[in-house]
Image (cartoon, helix red, strand yellow):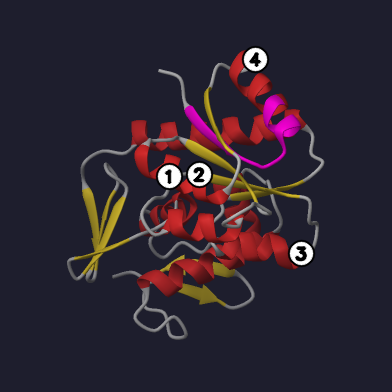
Amino acid sequence: MAKRILIVDDEPTLVKGLRFNLEQQEGYEIDVAYDGEEALEKFESEKYDLILLDLMLPKIDGMEVCQRVRLVSDVPIIMLSAKDADMDKIMGLEYGADDYMTKPFNVLELKARIKTILRRADNLRIKNNSDAIRAGDMLVDAANRSVTISGDEINLTAKEFDLLYLFITNKGKVYDRESILDIIWKHQGDLRVVDVHIRRLREKIEQNPARPEYILTKWGVGYYFANK
């Protein structure tokens, strides 16, 4: 069954080109939206495997679209933007994007990133079984990629779950940022991506992110999961 991708961009020429490359050449099933409002309407009524989301959109901007999607779903999001400022990239990640590409971009690189993200999601589904892993009050179910703490479900993005699953299945093992970038992002991005996602994950799973109980820091070395 073909993977479904939602392209959200207000540039018809760009959308047409992306649609041709992804639909005709790669075999994906493509849907499009030309503003943030239309994107949210389609997201709420359809199921997608990945979203290509422009930052600058009419009606509702890409940041808000990303944030609202993240409230209810961990569908992978690649943010597209004509802006090249580091702060814009970091903000995109803060709002829940899994990856970020600056326009103009190489369509071959975009396709490679899409394949990597989709392949990783498929591999996790194949490898994961129904056994849940418990650590303190946290329960991580690999089969349905869900996390609960004291019975309350925690909404994590795909990357956040991947990070948590890496740590919780290797309790006590310290990972430096380079290793995490290689395992989770396949060396795509810079080391700040790791720090941003660790911070965001802590804000969701730790009672006090400033004094974490689950994901700890070994200063000067890296991060590890507490032996609970």
- Please say if the residues under marks 1 and 2 sit with CB atoms less than 8 Å apart: yes
Among numbered discs 4 and 1, the one appearing first in the sequence: 4
- Is 13 colored magenta in this rendering? yes
How far is mark 3 from mark 4, CA to CA? 32 Å
How far is mark 3 from mark 1, CA to CA? 30 Å
Three-letter amino acid code at disc 1?
A: Glu
Pick whichever, 147 or 83, lies toward us: 83
How far is mark 3 from mark 2, CA to CA? 28 Å
Among numbered discs 3 and 4, the one appearing first in the sequence: 4
Three-letter amino acid code at disc 2?
A: Glu
Q: Secondary structure at mark 4?
A: helix
Pick whichever, 72 or 121, lies toward us: 72
Instruction: Look at mark 4 in the image and give the residue it sits on.
Output: 25
Q: Secondary structure at mark 1?
A: helix
- Is 51 colored magenta in this rendering? no
- Residue 107 visible: yes
Tell me the quarter of the image containing the C terminus.
bottom left
Q: Secondary structure at mark 2?
A: helix
Instruction: Look at mark 3 in the image and give the residue it sits on.
Output: 86
Instruction: Look at mark 2 in the image and give the residue it sits on.
Output: 38
Number of numbered discs: 4
Three-letter amino acid code at disc 4?
A: Gln
How far is mark 4 from mark 1, CA to CA? 27 Å
Among numbered discs 3 and 1, the one appearing first in the sequence: 1
How far is mark 2 from mark 4, CA to CA? 26 Å
Q: Please provide percent x and percent y for residue 193.
A: 63, 60
Q: Which residues are magenta?
A: 4-16
Instruction: Look at mark 1 in the image and give the residue it sits on.
Output: 41
Q: Residues within 10 Å of mark 2 (few under 14, many from 20)?
A: some
